[in-house]
């Protein structure tokens, strides 16, 4: 028997019957609440290469950190609050004591040392746990000084450079995913609905604040139990739309037929008028009839879709059979025209597409209808975003350097190498074509340029140098 909604764990202070209490501070226009939702289901632990050193889960953590880095560098810097949630379903053979029952907030929690409860008379510049919402309000008023708090609290960025002293909330939960799994129970629809509702609830404590949901998932919905549940909707056949428009033509319900994608779209659209759980069933039963009905203006959704491209001869896991999913040819043609693949124009530069398979018969590990839906949600308004983060066996990350940490192959690990790794258009970026400089800076060859690569430069500082390279740069 499936459990009732009561098994949802919010991890916040006191939210009695969702009667949100007044915030510890008054939100102002420009404040932002960010909820990062990480798919922790079994398939996210699948290795992306034969060595098994990188998984979808690893990519999800790195991708979330890339979004936060983008937040840091986007000026002006508002005061931001963050919460991190994960989801899986523990009704499976591999789950054990302590595993979460579906959606769960994992940071901050009451007593989190990196986001403590505020003391009496706390100054606005102090990072603190906001009990009325369960979010961590990061230190700093608008200004560049705000960035330091983000780096320490969320990004594993500290003077230690290797994250050993200040692991950061996202890096600290990287190790939580299981190395082995047996069943992939994925309550994606329920989890996204709950996350959107949590954000909307947080808004009642500060109605002027913006709300941003960041989702990291490989899709695979198959285990939701409530109003957003359903079989997969057929792909509507268009991918370049915003608020239901295909070019200039509006499509009722954005072209989605009955299924969880339709339910979740309706829930998102009618969230402003129906913010509470009690209204969820009404929201998913209401038809979207015109282009003025869209995501509430103060909300945005950022989505990273994680999947692999593989063929029957790959050692890459997972690799579904061609009978399970649409087969994508090298020219972008598909075996099932009713489920058209996303074309390259719909994806951000530097990310591979379904149509970019490198051999005939390559198969995506994500249903095209689900990928299309994730793209739709990430395009729901101008403040939202979508990225496809892919891997196939033909891609080898990074390059071989004769000297560890010597990004420019000068024979000396020095400031030039440090500067390349940390420059704005390389740091926290995906190390794939056409970003050749990022590929060279991906020293641990995991597909990302981040603090792990910077640590390699600092660990090898001065090696090969004829002249003293000077002191190591301060972080």
Image (cartoon, grey):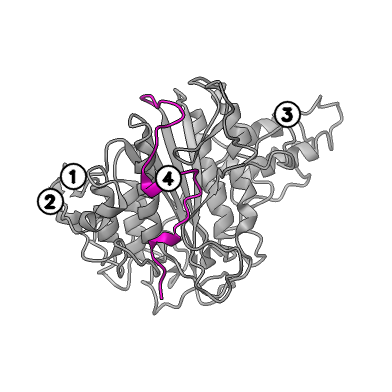
Comparing labels 1 and 4, the label whose residue is closer to the camera: 4
Which residue is identified by label 1?
293
Q: Magenta stretch: residue 24 in it?
A: yes
User: Quadrant location of the C terminus?
Assistant: top right
Q: Earlier in the sequence, mark 1 or mark 4?
A: 4
Q: Look at the image and give the residue range highlighted in magenta.
A: 1-30
Which residue is identified by label 3?
415
Which residue is identified by label 2?
289
How busy is the neighbourhood of tag 3: few (under 14 within 10 Å), some, or many (20 plus)?
Answer: some
Q: Earlier in the sequence, mark 3 or mark 1?
A: 1
Magenta stretch secondary structure, dominant: loop
Q: Are marks 1 and 4 in contact (CB under 8 Å)?
A: no
How busy is the neighbourhood of tag 1: few (under 14 within 10 Å), some, or many (20 plus)?
Answer: some
Q: Earlier in the sequence, mark 3 or mark 2?
A: 2
Q: Residue at x 16, y 44 (%)?
A: 291
- Distance CA(mark 4)–CA(mark 3): 50 Å
Placement of 296 over or under 475, stated as above or below: below
Placement of 196 over or under 463, stated as above or below: below
Residue 11 is left or right of residue 246, and the answer is right
Q: Position of residue 307 (x, y in %)?
A: 47, 61
Comparing labels 4 and 3, the label whose residue is closer to the camera: 4
- Distance CA(mark 3)–CA(mark 1): 52 Å
Which residue is identified by label 4?
15
Residue 142 is left or right of residue 462, and the answer is left
Label 2 sits on a secondary structure element that is loop
- Distance CA(mark 4)–CA(mark 2): 34 Å
């Amino acid at each position: 028997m499936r459990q009732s909604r009561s098994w949802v764990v919010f991890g916040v202070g006191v939210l009695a019957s969702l009667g949100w209490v007044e915030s510890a501070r008054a939100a102002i226009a420009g404040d932002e609440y960010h909820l990062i939702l990480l798919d922790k289901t079994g398939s996210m632990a699948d290795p992306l290469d034969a060595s098994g050193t990188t998984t979808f889960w690893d990519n999800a953590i790195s991708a979330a950190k890339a979004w936060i880095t983008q937040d840091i560098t986007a000026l002006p810097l508002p005061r931001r609050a963050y919460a991190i949630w994960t989801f899986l379903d523990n009704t499976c053979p591999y789950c054990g004591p302590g595993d979460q029952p579906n959606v769960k907030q994992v940071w901050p929690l009451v007593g989190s040392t990196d986001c403590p409860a505020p003391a009496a008379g706390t100054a606005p510049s102090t990072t603190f746990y906001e009990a009325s919402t369960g979010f961590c309000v990061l230190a700093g008023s608008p200004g560049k000084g705000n960035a330091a708090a983000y780096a320490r609290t969320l990004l594993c960025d500290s003077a230690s450079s290797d994250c050993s002293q200040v692991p950061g909330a996202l890096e600290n939960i990287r190790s939580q995913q299981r190395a082995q799994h047996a069943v992939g129970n994925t309550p994606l629809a329920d989890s996204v609905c709950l996350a959107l509702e949590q954000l909307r609830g947080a808004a009642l404590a500060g109605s002027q604040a913006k709300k941003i949901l960041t989702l990291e998932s490989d899709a695979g919905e198959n285990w939701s139990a409530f109003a957003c549940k359903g079989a997969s909707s057929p792909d509507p056949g268009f991918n370049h739309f915003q608020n239901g428009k295909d070019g200039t033509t509006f499509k009722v319900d954005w072209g989605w037929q009955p299924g969880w994608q339709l339910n979740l779209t309706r829930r998102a659209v009618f969230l402003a008028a129906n913010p509470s759980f009690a209204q969820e069933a009404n929201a998913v039963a209401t038809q979207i009839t015109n282009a003025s009905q869209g995501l509430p203006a103060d909300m945005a959704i950022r989505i990273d879709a994680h999947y692999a491209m593989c063929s029957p001869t790959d050692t890459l896991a997972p690799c579904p059979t061609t009978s399970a999913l649409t087969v994508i040819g090298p020219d972008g043609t598909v075996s099932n025209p009713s489920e058209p693949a996303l074309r390259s124009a719909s994806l951000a530069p530097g990310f591979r597409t379904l149509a970019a398979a490198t051999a005939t018969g390559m198969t995506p590990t994500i249903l095209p209808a689900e990928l299309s839906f994730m793209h739709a949600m990430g395009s729901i308004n101008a403040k939202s975003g979508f990225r496809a983060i892919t891997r196939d066996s033909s891609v080898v990350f990074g390059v071989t350097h004769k000297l560890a940490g010597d990004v420019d192959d000068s024979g000396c690990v020095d400031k030039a190498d440090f500067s390349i790794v940390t420059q704005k258009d390389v740091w926290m970026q995906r190390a794939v074509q056409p970003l050749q400089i990022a590929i060279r800076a991906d020293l641990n060859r995991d597909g990302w340029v981040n603090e792990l690569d910077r640590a390699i430069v600092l660990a090898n500082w001065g090696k090969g140098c004829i002249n003293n390279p000077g002191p190591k740069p301060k972080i």
